[in-house]
Amino acid sequence: MPISAVDAISPAFQHAKQQLFQPFRFTQWVRLALVGFLAGELGSGGSSFHYNVPSTHHSNGSEHFLGAVLSPQLAHYMDLLAPFIIPLIVFGLALLVLFLYINSVMRFILFDSIIAKECHIRRGWARRNHNGLRFFVWQIVLMLISFAAFILLIGIPLVIVWAKGWFRNPGEHLAPLVLGGILLFLLVLVFVVVMAVITVMTKDFVVPQMALEDISAVEGWRRLWLLLKAETGGYAVYILMKIALAIAAAIALGIITLIVFLALLLPVGGLGVAAVLGGMAAGLTWNFYTIALAVVVGLVVLAALIFVASMISVPAIVFFPAYSIYFFAGRYPPLAALLWPSTPANAASAPSPPEAPPLPPAPAPLG
């Protein structure tokens, strides 16, 4: 029977407890930390959209600031690196697409890991590669659609305001500009929330269908839409509960992560300061080689911190997918059959043993 979003918390918590601590296996934690990080589960319960606001500072001011901060020698090396900026941007975009593909496959590996309570990356990659490719195409299309919708949402009002000439004399149109800005902000906020809900419901309710029935994301959403119309309130409460649980988990894990980071960064930072002061005493200056060395060291430290944060977040990495699975299992029979296997048919239909024959009546007493 379907259970509510509140009732799904307890079995998900018990599931995470059993998978992680009964027994505790360090290698499983490492695998789950890697899969959870690549699947984007460190920020469980929601999605984030970041938009860059263009700077309004004049270029001369920026050049003056950079000239004051950077030494002439360092500025010279930055000029040498300028031709590589566009190739680096192209490389960054290619890397983004690669990680999005890895994220798509890892989402299915994480689903299998929660169901089986075992995480096997290589085996899961070979098994779920085709599912991940379908999900990757869905994510690319959704990203392009959301980007185009955002551009239209922002661009159309700006074009209208520009055509009316309000930007030339903003003081004369202050009231409509302020009201329009507030309305535009609310529209953008609604857009971001809708995209976040679509993303969460896709990974929570569409991915299981794709994994168990080998269907496309579009077909999974068609079926999910029928379920949403039949039980809108139940799924709305699920989203609200997941937001509340995500906030609570973020606060708890954030405090633990901050304490661990401080414990790790204090000695590492001390060594870094000592290395810089030692280099300055030895006559080293900032050049291409010292900058490259600093970047490599910084990347190593960043990778170590990400690994530590992922290890700390493993309970959340297991709990939140388990929470969605237990909520959805009562509404999706194939998942329920996998989560709670029924008694085998031959055992259920086996005949019961024959009853013992009744004892013969006792003989009548003589006389």
Image (spheres, grey):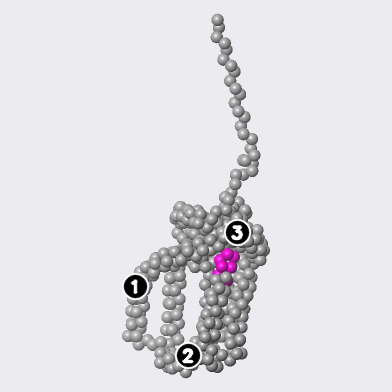
Residue 152 shows in the view: yes
Image height of 202 relative to 25, above or below: below
| Magenta stretch: includes residue 238 | no
- Do callouts 1 and 2 mark residues in contact (Cβ within 8 Å)? no
Q: Where is residue 242 in the image (x, y as percent from the top left)?
A: 51, 63
Asked if the residue under mark 3 is in contact with the one under mark 2, i.e. CB atoms within 8 Å, the reply is: no
Residue 120 visible in the shown view: no
Amino acid type indicated by mark 1: Pro
- Point out the stretch of residues depicted in magenta: 195-203
Residue at x-position 55% and y-position 62%: 236
* Label 1 sits on residue: 267
Q: What residue type is labelled 3?
A: Glu
Q: Which of 74/199 is in front?
A: 199
Residue 330, x across and y down, in percent: 58, 53
Q: Distance between the residues labelled 1 and 3?
A: 54 Å
Ranked by sequence position, the earlier of labels 2 and 3 is: 2
| Residue at (46% x, 72% y) in the render | 303
For label 1, the crowd category at 10 Å Cα-Cα, with few meaning under 14, some 14 to 19 and many 20 or more, is few
The C terminus appears in which quarter of the rendering? top right
* Callout in the foreground (2, 3): 3
Label 2 Cα neighbours within 10 Å, binned few <14 / some 14-19 / many ≥20:
few
Residue that numbered label 3 is attached to: 231
Q: Name the residue under label 2.
A: 57
Badge 3 marks a residue whose secondary structure is: loop
